[in-house]
Structures are given as C-alpha cells and as structure tokens.
Image: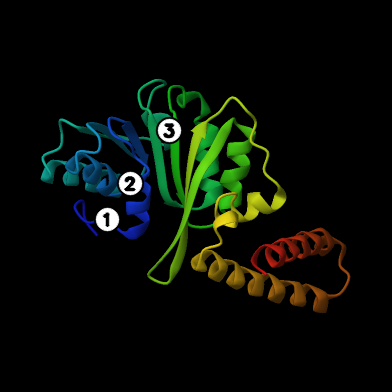
C-alpha cells in the first residue's frame, strides 16, 4: 500500500469522500489517505492528524515526498484536538477499534462544529460507534462490509440529522444497512461471530452458576438470538 494505491478498506473510506470536501484524517499514520484524495483530485485540502511521533514523522515525509505540502497540513495531537471548529467538513477515522473511535468522537465533540460527514472504519466493535452516533445526532446513511487479507472490515458513513436515529438492538449490533443487504461477507462474519459466542456460552455453562457471569451470559444469549434471526 502507498499513497497511489490504497488498501481495499481505505479505498472504501475514500469512496465516501465527495468533491470539494475539506477532510481531517485522524490517526493518519503515513497520510496515505489524504495524499491519495488530493492526488486523485477528489479534494483540495486536508489535515492529517497523528498523536504518535513515529507515524507523525512518516506522514510529514509522505506529504513532502508527494509534494503536497500546499494541500495537506500534518499536525501532531490527540484525536480531534488537531482541528478547530468550522475548519473541516469531513472527518475520517480508520483502522482503530470501535470503542477508541467512539472515545475520540466523544472527547472531541466540541471540534465537530461544521462537520457534515463522518467516515469511520472500525477494526472491531462497530456497535460502539453506532451507539455513539445515535446518542449524538448523527444518521447512518450507508455502510459497507469487505474482506481483505482474511479479515473483515466495516465502513460507516454518518451525516448530521435533526431527527434522532432510533436503531433496534439488532441494527446496533449488525448495522442497519448491512442487515438489509445481507451480503455473503456479512453472513460469513456473523456466522463466525455466532460460533464464537456459542463457544463462550458453553464455557460459561460449564463454569456453573456464578453471579458475576449471569449478566454476561444473558448478553451473549441475546446476541446469539439476534444473529440467528438475522442470518437464517
């Protein structure tokens, strides 16, 4: 992967970026995504944010190598602290766990003024993101699921709404768009998850009636039921 040829998961993120948007890529790593977007003339301006020194320097070097310093501003900082309210129209966060992405959005809520679009690619636990979006006035307008290097990724597109999104427990877990489309990769992912939940449940049952496990056992039983109803 490089700034001219993205991975499939980052291409899916890039596909959701519209013309003339100003993008902040949070946790940008090598800044491949913003460099790609500018080189493809999809956008004219971007901010690449990184909190870790090594990736921050890699992003600076990549922007310099691609001669895109007039278009991409590389900034070091934690999460959304690298932007100011009203500065960007789109925020992308890719390649992290869902709980961490949700934490970044929650901690930086005051920086999201003027942002119309969130493009989020969690490696795990997309339910954390959907819950945050629902609680904070965002609408999931599209979702994609894809397999790359034997791993399955989800990409969520969220836009601001005046109406409160009201997702069912199944939609929160599996995705309101993905659950309707029922792609082969979607079914593969949730068949794998179902098998894993059943293994965990069996281990709990063998452990006997422990009070501390009862709530977790109920949660897993509920997830098993929702998954079975969705994919069968």
Q: Which residue is mark 3?
A: 80
Give the mark nearest the N terminus, 3 or 1: 1
* Image vertical order of residue 49 relative to residue 151, above or below: above
Q: Is the Cβ of the residue at disc 1 closer than 8 Å to that at disc 2?
A: yes
Give the mark nearest the N terminus, 3 or 2: 2
Give the mark nearest the N terminus, 1 or 2: 1
Q: Is the Cβ of the residue at disc 3 closer than 8 Å to that at disc 1?
A: no
As drawn, the residue found furthest toward the bottom would be 206
Q: Is the Cβ of the residue at disc 3 closer than 8 Å to that at disc 2?
A: no
Residue 225, position in %: x, y?
75, 64
Dot 2: element: helix
As drawn, the residue found furthest toward the front would be 181
Residue 61 in which image quadrant = top left
Residue 92 in which image quadrant = top left
What label does residue 141 carry, if any?
none
Mark 2, Cα crowd under 10 Å, few <14 / some 14-19 / many 20+, is: some
Residue 68, position in %: x, y?
15, 37
Q: Nearer the viewer, mark 3 or mark 2?
A: 2
Residue 38 in which image quadrant = top left
Q: CA distance from mark 1 to mark 2?
A: 9 Å
Q: Which residue is mark 2?
A: 14
* Image vertical order of residue 108 relative to residue 201, above or below: above
* Camera-side residue of 227 and 106: 227
Residue 40, position in %: x, y?
19, 43
Q: Which residue is mark 1?
A: 6
Dot 1: element: loop
């Amino acid at each position: 992967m490089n700034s001219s040829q993205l991975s499939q998961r980052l291409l899916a993120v890039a596909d959701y970026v519209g013309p003339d948007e100003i993008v902040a890529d949070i946790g940008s790593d090598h800044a491949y995504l913003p460099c790609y977007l500018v080189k493809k003339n999809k956008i004219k301006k971007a901010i690449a944010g990184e909190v870790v020194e090594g990736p921050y320097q890699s992003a600076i070097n990549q922007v310099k190598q691609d001669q895109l310093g007039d278009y991409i501003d590389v900034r070091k900082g934690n999460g959304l602290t690298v932007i100011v309210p009203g500065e960007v129209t789109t925020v992308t966060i890719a390649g992290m766990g869902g709980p961490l992405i949700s934490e970044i959005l929650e901690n930086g809520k005051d920086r999201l003024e003027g942002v119309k679009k969130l493009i989020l690619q969690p490696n795990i636990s997309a339910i954390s993101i959907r819950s945050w979006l629902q609680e904070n006035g965002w609408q999931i307008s599209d979702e994609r699921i894809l397999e790359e290097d034997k791993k399955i990724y989800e990409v969520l597109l969220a836009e601001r709404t005046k109406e409160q999104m009201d997702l069912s427990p199944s939609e929160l877990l599996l995705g309101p768009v993905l659950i309707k489309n029922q792609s082969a990769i979607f079914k593969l992912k949730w068949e794998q998850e179902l098998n894993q939940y059943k293994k965990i449940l069996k281990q709990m049952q063998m452990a006997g009636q422990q009070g501390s496990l009862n709530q977790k056992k109920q949660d897993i039983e509920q997830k098993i039921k929702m998954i079975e109803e969705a994919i069968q």
